[in-house]
Amino acid sequence: MPDLTVLITGATDGIGRRLATRFARPGNHLLLHGRDARRGADAVAEAESAGASAHFLPADLASLDDVRVLAHTVLDTCDQLDILVNNAGISVPGGPREQTPEGFERHLAVNYLAPFLMTRLLLPTLSAARPSRIVNVVSAGQSSISFDDLMLNSGYSGTRAYGQSKVALGMLTFDLAQEHATSVLTANCLHPGTHLDTTMVRAAGIAPSGSADQGAQAVFRLATDPSLADTTGHYFDGTRRSRMHPQAYDTDARAQLRRISERLTGLVH
């Protein structure tokens, strides 16, 4: 691989942290997002010990203001972003409904609106000079999006909230692939593995059935494998090409979600 500039969200723990170690080699520059400064410093030190340069980007993805600051920091410091991995996410299946300070249901805000806004803001540097890739980490746990009650004010379920946020992220992936079909930018998404040994899985009280390394390897493959250089607009279950929830392929639903998302994130008024 040539020297790469790579941005990984959720890079201080779990799949993201292990993914960062795979990219940590001389010549690469890693932008490692997280919320915890101590863990961020540890991740940077680990990457630098392997010969990469690295920088920690603190942000709470529940805050769109934080997302904007993160994106503009990248735009101000990077002429070219080669790989963007939207990995950070939350899952609170049994918890109560929570809102962000901006009034959005928390799963939708963190798992979808944050990567939607950040990716849209970063597009100028993702398609600037040479081939680049967007990899969005979704899930096999998918639920249809309720456009009549996107924030799930009625009949809330954490499982449903998580599932619709991941379908939404898949819809963003397919939109990006279609929009950039004739460019050097590709966009794909994947389910990295079921019940991998991550903090999120353990916090949900689920016994892990796979390693975080397994998930990191699947993401790394999609981000770097030369045989996938021209692959775009696909969903993978691990390393196997698969199919998402049918709604993700509905162009009218995607257009509706895109219009709503642009308004909610302030990209259009």
Image: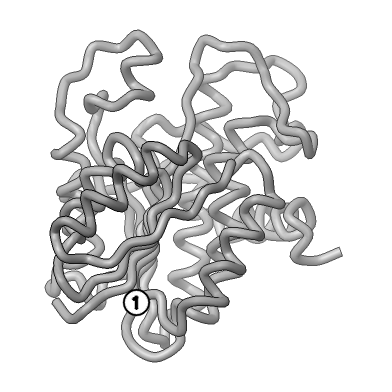
Q: Residue at the location (67% across, 34% down)?
A: 146
Count every numbered label the image shows and give the total.
Answer: 1
Q: In the displayed structure, would residue 257 be above or below residue 196? A: below
Q: Is residue 115 visible?
A: yes
Q: Residue furthest bottom?
A: 129
Q: Residue at the location (25% across, 52% down)?
A: 20
The amino acid marked with disc number 1 is: Ser
Q: Residue at the location (76% across, 22% down)?
A: 153
Residue 219 in picture, x, y percent from top left: 24, 52
The N terminus: image quadrant: bottom left
Q: Is residue 233 visible?
A: no
The C terminus: image quadrant: bottom right
Q: Residue at the location (35% across, 41% down)?
A: 12
Q: Is residue 97 left or right of 168 when viewed as pictured?
A: right
Of 212 and 170, which appears nearest the observer? 212
Coloration of the structure image: one colour
Q: Kindly identify which residue carries mark 1.
A: 132
Residue 157 in picture, x, y percent from top left: 59, 16
Of 191 and 57, which appears nearest the observer? 57
Residue 121 in picture, x, y percent from top left: 61, 69
